[in-house]
Amino acid sequence: GINTCVGADNEQLLGDVDLLGKRTCVHDDGVTGRSHIDGMLGGATLTPEQTRQWQDLDRRNLQRLRQIVDSDGFPHSSQVGRDGVAAAWLLLQHADADPDFQSRMLSLLGTRDDPALSKEQLALLTDRVLTAQGKPQRYGSQYEGVGAEMKMKPVQAPAALDQRRAAMGMMPSATYACLLKQLYAPASVPDAR
């Protein structure tokens, strides 16, 4: 299980793992969203209908986030609290349908002082933007499924990767890779005997 990757005594990393498993999204009518769809992950393959639902939810959430940003700027914790910033950031992180918006917001957030926005979140968004631009990522957070395996997308200067990750408050790359393997392992099929 996950303790194999991080060790049972490492509460900070286990806290990070807990964050990897949760997704809450701001939706037009308040807080609803992806969590029911994400619960289907963990090795499970989404049906075409589930994929369509997920994409539709992402599209609506992104549209709402753009409206908020256009009228009030990217949410700040002094306006919406830590949870509001976390929800807005998560929508931005998964706004792959609009990489220009992600890039523009990264430029803004990189210069912003908001205690609810962590260096790790900026690192994750940085990697998302770089990979969308066809460039090697900086922090090694973006993976892709290759067959039944999760493989890290190309990364800048691999020898210094863990130093860059540590500077951003991220777990070592080997631990992260192990966690992804555990979280996205193919669902086991019961023996049919």
Image (cartoon, rainbow, N blue to C red):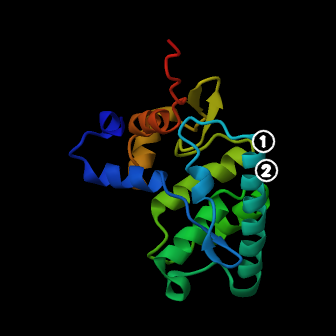
Nearest to the observer: residue 35 or residue 26: 35
Amino acid at the residue labelled 2? Arg
Q: Position of residue 50 (x, y in %)?
A: 72, 48
- Tag on residue 48? 1
Per the image, the residue denoted by label 2 is: 52
Residue at image point 48% right, 39% down: 183
| Residue 63 percent across, percent down from the top left | 78, 70
How crowded pointer 1 is (Cα within 10 Å; few <14, some 14-19, many 20+) is rated as few
Give the image location of residue 64, x and y in percent. Answer: 74, 74
Q: Is residue 104 visible?
A: yes
Q: Is residue 47 left or right of residue 161?
A: right
Q: Residue 8 appears at what percent x and percent y?
A: 23, 42
Residue at 57% across / 72% down in the picture? Answer: 111
The furthest residue to the front:
193
Say what secondary structure mark 1 lies in.
helix
Image point (55%, 88%), residue name: 79
Tag 1 and tag 2, C-beta contact below 8 Å? yes
Say whether residue 126 is visible.
no
